[in-house]
Image (spheres, grey):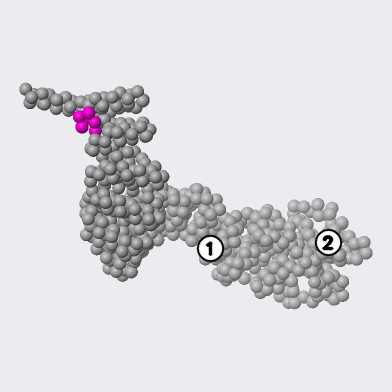
Amino acid sequence: MLVTMKWHGLACQKGVYFPNNGKDRNCCRSSCCGGYGCSAMKTRRIHVGTCELNVVSVSMNGLTWFGCVRLKLPQMGLQFGSITMRNSLVVSGVVACNESKLVSEDNRQKELIRRGIDQFDKDPLGQKLPPWGIVSDNSELVSNEKEEQYLVESGKDQFDMDSCGQNLPLQQGSDINNEKIVQSPSLLNNRVTFNESRVHFLEETDENELSRRILMLSRSNKIRSALQLLRSMEFSGLQPNRHACNSLLSCLIRHELHEDALRVFEYMKKNEITTGHAYSLILKAVASTKGCDSALDMFTELEAFSREKKDFDVIVYNTMISVCGKEKNWVETERIWRSMKENDYHGTQVTYSLLVSIFVRCGRNELALEAYSEMVQNGLKPREDTLHAVIGACSKKGNWDLALNIFQNMLDHGLKPKLIACNALINLLGKAGEIKLAFKVFKILKSLGHTPDEYTWNALLSGLYRENQHVDALQLFERLKREQNSLLNEHLYNTALMSCQKLGLWDRALQLVWQAEASGLPVSTASYNLAIGACEVARKPEVALEVYEHMVHQKCPPDTFTYLSLIRICIWASLWDEVEEILDQVAPDVSLYNAVIHGMCLRGKTESAKKLYMKMGKSGLKPDRALMLQNLRKNSTKRSRFSTCRR
């Protein structure tokens, strides 16, 4: 009998002699295993992992059997588990499968001798069986389409060729169903893992060509084939290039096979073929599956490892900065930034854009401005979104000159600042008292085609109010009503009411309040307080009390500032009954009692002030003793002067 074993072109033939008509069938099994060891393993006899022979053919009495067997193989770099492989019997163009239990002769020879008789005996019908066990005529056989597709893609039809590359004739007359075969359990699983990949002998030994195949398989999402080819290359002592490994790593991560991706990455580390792209891929995968903290731990470890290998690049730092930015972890973002500079890596445009954006979102505007300054010093051109973020940071820090310079540079380079950047700059200039520059930016805003919104108008009105240009503020408000009445809101009304209060325009203030109510806008307590304040400045106590009554009628709750304003104007008008009525209606409040005591002392009602002072003590309130003594001294001084004048 002739035994032929073939693995991608590597073949071994061995003659087997049966002295007793094939009764000593253990000879056949031993010869098959021994032949493999001579042809493929040579002197490597220590077997730890497992692999599969693609084709083993046995010729006897004019019949040819083909099979796939599992044998112990040396431990490889990638940690794979044991695999149960299949045997195939080809008779008359049909492939049938059953489970193989063949192992190495060296470790389990005695066990094979004991079990060989049972496996090679005749079946109940007296038919001779192939060396790989019983093939059931009634088996439920399923087409192995995935393996056939892989064989077609690799260009090697392993089941139709003998060891010399010639087509093997198939025996006719078999009664085995040629439409179905038993499918391997690994092919029934939707997810592909390393434990399901097989090792093949490779006819091609050019590492560049094999790397190209891994690259094409990965791009075509042929994960199983790519893993089998990678494993076969490792077993054969071949090594794929970095580009192929990166492509396979990206493919595994794309299909969420993160554990397999980690194993491939460890293989790359072991063989020192890691790249910055590989680091970035694996760090993003760890961050998405295990969180930012796990990614940071891995980054710290890889950073120490890369100092020796010098295979880190700035893209890896950009990846981790982005990961931390998504979690708004500005502390780790700053640490990675400092570490990058300590390791002599120079940031790119993307690096500084990420830093500025993250620091601005986290409210660390000083760090954002520092990153921008370093970016300019390194000669990098900021992107448009970075410039907008820096203007926002300047508005928070009050750095209006830098913001104005950036705004002007954007215009000089043909960039169109966004409306939000224009509003931030107008508000910043208004707070800095540069109201003329603010209106220049307002004109530029309109020339750029932007339509001013409520934030634009509020920034201008607030700037005019801070500069005590209250008349101009009211005129601008009237202009807003004419041009964009739909933008009017409570804040804009309140800004106009503040100007009315400063000018004592009580009638204009009341008009604004009624207009706001008529337009359906919510009128808050602060708005009514501003109207009452305008009446206080204009010395209109009766009108102030009417506004207060209207406010209560509108179910708008007064606050302490409302009562303080009313008390002050009533004391000025000597409306003591109204003052007492207010104190009776309101819950005891130290601020209100002190205001009344102070007003009474100023109006010469010392006795009433003392009574109210005693009432505060009985009510459990803590009066302002210093204020009371100060007012009593003033009154006593006035009395002594008056008595001296009379004498």
Dot 1: element: helix
Q: What quarter of the picture does the N terminus occupy?
A: bottom right
**Residue interval drawn in magenta:** 599-605
Q: Nearer the viewer, residue 2 or 70?
A: 70
One can see residue 395 in this view: no
Point 75% across, 64% down: residue: 183
- Horizontal side, residue 172 vs residue 339: left or right: right
- The picture quadrant where one finds residue 131 is bottom right
636 above or below 174? above
Left or right of residue 7, residue 626 in this image: left
| Pair 1/2: label in front | 1
Residue tagged by mark 1? 246
Decide which of 607, 141 is in the foreground and name it. Answer: 607
Residue at image location 10% in from the left, 26% down from the top? 641
How far apart marks 1 and 2 lie (CA) works out to 43 Å
The verdict on residue 446 being magenta is no
Instruction: Find residue 574 and report its horizontal and vertical position in percent.
Output: 24, 35
Residue 520 x %, y %:
40, 55
Q: How many neighbours does mark 2 have within 10 angstroms: few (below 14), some (14-19), or many (20 or more)? A: many
Callout 2 amino acid? Gly
Mark 1: which amino acid?
Answer: Asn
Kindly identify the residue that appears in the image at 27 percent across and 68 percent down.
Answer: 412
